[in-house]
Image: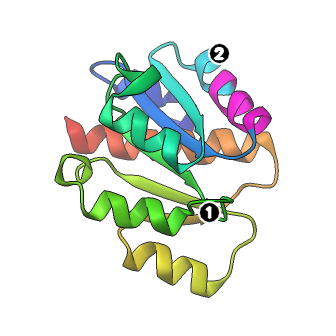
């Protein structure tokens, strides 16, 4: 089974929350998965305050579903990725949602800080959209199996 077959191993739909400051990139990631995997959904929010609203299901996100996986852009302006990871550490309801921190290109200090504050995986952002698809499909497959 190849990485493109991630949706075939899912017993139910799989949802991701992408926290990014670039709406066009977030939109492309969401479209890429929704076009290839009918049961993989990707919502995106711009910044940490919106991510917290989404995860607490408040404000405009009162009807949002709990994500199965969080993709966190490292280097966000305003409240940072580190702030989000600290908030996650203090919110037990979020502990079981895996967080994958993506950086471009990132430093060893960024990696160590993210992992120390609770990110499950730290990765450098893929250079092109095909690499994004392969990496995220593989991650979905791994994390969906953890749920089964």
Task: Identify residue for label 1.
Answer: 74
Residue 68, magenta (yes or no): no
Instruction: Spot the residue most to the bottom.
Output: 109
Determine whether 111 is above or below 54 in the image: below
Instruction: Spot the residue most to the front.
Output: 59
Residue positioned 41% across, 43% down in the render: 52
Determine whether 65 is above or below 100 in the image: above
Say whether disc 1 or disc 2 marks the residue closer to the N-terminus: 2
Task: Identify residue for label 2.
Answer: 35
Quick one: 5 or 32, which is closer to the camera? 32
Secondary structure, magenta segment, majority class? helix
When asked about the image quadrant of residue 77, the answer is: bottom right
Q: Are marks 1 and 2 in contact (CB under 8 Å)?
A: no
Residue 27, magenta (yes or no): yes
Quick one: 26 or 35, which is closer to the camera? 26
Determine whether 95 is above or below 69 in the image: below
Residue positioned 24% across, 45% down in the render: 146
Residue positioned 76% across, 38% down in the render: 25
Which class describes the residues within 10 Å of circle 1: few (<14), some (14-19), or many (20+)?
A: many
**Could you tell me if residue 119 is visible in this image?**
no
Residue positioned 28% across, 40% down in the render: 145
Magenta stretch? Answer: 23-31
Which class describes the residues within 10 Å of circle 2: few (<14), some (14-19), or many (20+)?
A: few
């Amino acid at each position: 089974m190849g990485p493109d077959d991630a949706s075939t191993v899912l017993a139910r739909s799989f949802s991701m929350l992408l926290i990014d400051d670039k709406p066009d990139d977030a939109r492309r990631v969401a479209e890429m998965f929704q076009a290839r995997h009918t049961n993989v959904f990707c919502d995106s929010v711009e910044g940490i305050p919106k991510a917290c609203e989404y995860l607490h299901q408040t404000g405009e996100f009162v009807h949002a579903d709990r994500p199965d996986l969080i993709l966190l852009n490292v280097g966000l302006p305003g409240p940072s990725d580190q702030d989000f990871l600290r908030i996650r550490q203090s919110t037990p309801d979020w502990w079981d949602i895996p967080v994958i921190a993506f950086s471009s290109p990132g430093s060893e200090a960024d990696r160590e800080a993210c992992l120390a504050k609770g990110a499950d995986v730290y990765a450098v952002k893929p250079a092109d959209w095909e690499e994004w698809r392969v990496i995220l499909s593989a991650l979905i497959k791994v994390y969906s199996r953890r749920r089964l």
